[in-house]
Image: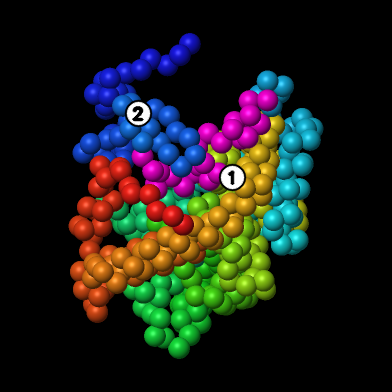
Amino acid sequence: MATENLDKQKTIDLRKKHVGPSCKVFFSHDPIKIVRARGQYMYNEKDEKYLDCINNVAHVGHCHPDVVEAGAKQMELLNTNSRFLHDNLVLYAQRLQATLPEKLSVCYFVNSGSEANDLALRLAWQYTGHKDIITLENAYHGHVSSLIDISPYKFQQMACAEPSQHVHVALSPDIYRGKYCEDHPDPAIAYAENVKDIIEQAHKKGRKIAAFIAESLQSCGGQVIPPVGYFQKVAQHVRNAGGIFIADEVQVGFGRVGTHFWGFQLQGEDFVPDIVTMGKPIGNGHPMSCVITTREVAESFMSSGMEYFNTFGGNPVSCAIGLAVLDVIEKEDLQGNALHIGGYLTRLLYDLKKRHLLVGDVRGRGLFIGLDLVRNRDKRTPATAEAQDVIYSHKIKHIKKRTI
């Protein structure tokens, strides 16, 4: 039965009546009702076209025909849980692992980035026997309780904004507006020393570090690109303390940075996390995610005696879709496209910076790009209100075509 096409105001009224009030919509003062999408474009109920610069899920384009076909074909055959043997699960695990360093060889399939990061914490707690987690300023890792605890981006909005006793917040390695900026002789070591200090203070209180977790490039924290060498030094300090390193690739993985398939690889070939989590782009909008870790960590998790089971994680339909996404990335050279188009976009943004004092910084890699808007370039005073105006100026839909 086809979905009824409601009047926009009726949709708004029903949402207010039946959907939790904390579930916000984009452009709340004048929300856009999207009824279909294709490629990089979305269309409202009036068939007006929008270039989608918000979505971080439709990695290979909305409703990509190859992905839609793969999911539909498998759904016609079988969809069941992963306790039954099925080729899609093992073929997808093999294909996904091939994009990573050999040491990261064991997959756990789940359904969202939040589930992936929650499971990563469980793995770390079991493997190390420790409890404490080090996270970064402004970090966001998911919406479940364990992740709100390690997400200052979220818990600092709460009335009683105080981290849990087992959570330690390190400085964000932001060389534009952080404690150690681009003029520092070695910001990577300086920021890593902050993590070392946190570990030492925790040990003095009798606490032990299970893991350091960070997005490979911080997204909600302001498109922060860690200085090269930072992760290596942090991993050294954390591992010396008996902890492990978790790289959150939920937002930035799958070729988005252009030069590499995974964001953590920007740190250099010598850096390998102990756990990598992924989500969002992995299924191009289909709810799936994955945790990949070492054989040692996986065997430790098994030794707890508790079986791990996820009803929908790794089901045949999700794995078929995941395989199709990897096929499209390769076939259409989307990693190369991210490098090419990202470079073009970055040059345009630098041109804007030359013409507008409001633009303080342009930073990013591939198609992971951010503008830092400031009221004063010397003081780097955040232009918060102006940024909000830019974000919500969605009425500007007609853009003059330019040749790339």
Q: Is residue 399 left or right of residue 210?
A: left
Name the spot of residue 173 as percent of width and height, x first: 44, 72
Q: Relative to the observer, which residue lies in front, 13 or 404?
A: 404
Which mark sits nearer the N-terminus, 1 or 2? 2
Q: Is residue 61 left or right of residue 270?
A: left
Identify whether 18 is placed above or below 237: above
Residue type at mark 1: give it.
Ile
* Membership of 57 in magenta stretch: yes
Which residues are drawn in magenta? 50-73
Name the spot of residue 153 as percent of width and height, x first: 37, 56
Q: Is residue 261 left or right of residue 401?
A: right
> Quadrant of the rendered structure where residue 121 is?
bottom right
> Quadrant of the rendered structure where residue 75 is?
top right
Labels 1, 2: front one: 2
Identify whether 153 is placed above or below 27: below
Residue positioned 33% across, 32% down in the render: 48
Residue type at mark 2: give it.
Asp
Residue positioned 46% across, 47% down in the render: 56
**Element type where label 1 sits in the image:** helix
Give the residue pinned by disc 1: 282
Name the spot of residue 124 as percent of width and height, x first: 61, 58
Furthest-top residue in view?
Answer: 1
How far apart are the alpha carbons under marks 1 and 2? 28 Å
Give the residue pinned by disc 2: 47
**Element type where label 2 sits in the image:** loop
Badge 2 crowding class, 10 Å Cα cut-off, few under 14, some 14 to 19, many 20 or more, is few
Name the spot of residue 77 as percent of width and height, x first: 72, 22
Q: Relative to the observer, which residue lies in front, 300 or 177?
A: 177
* Membership of 112 in magenta stretch: no
> Quadrant of the rendered structure where residue 261 is?
bottom right
Badge 1 crowding class, 10 Å Cα cut-off, few under 14, some 14 to 19, many 20 or more, is many
Q: Is residue 24 left or right of residue 74?
A: left
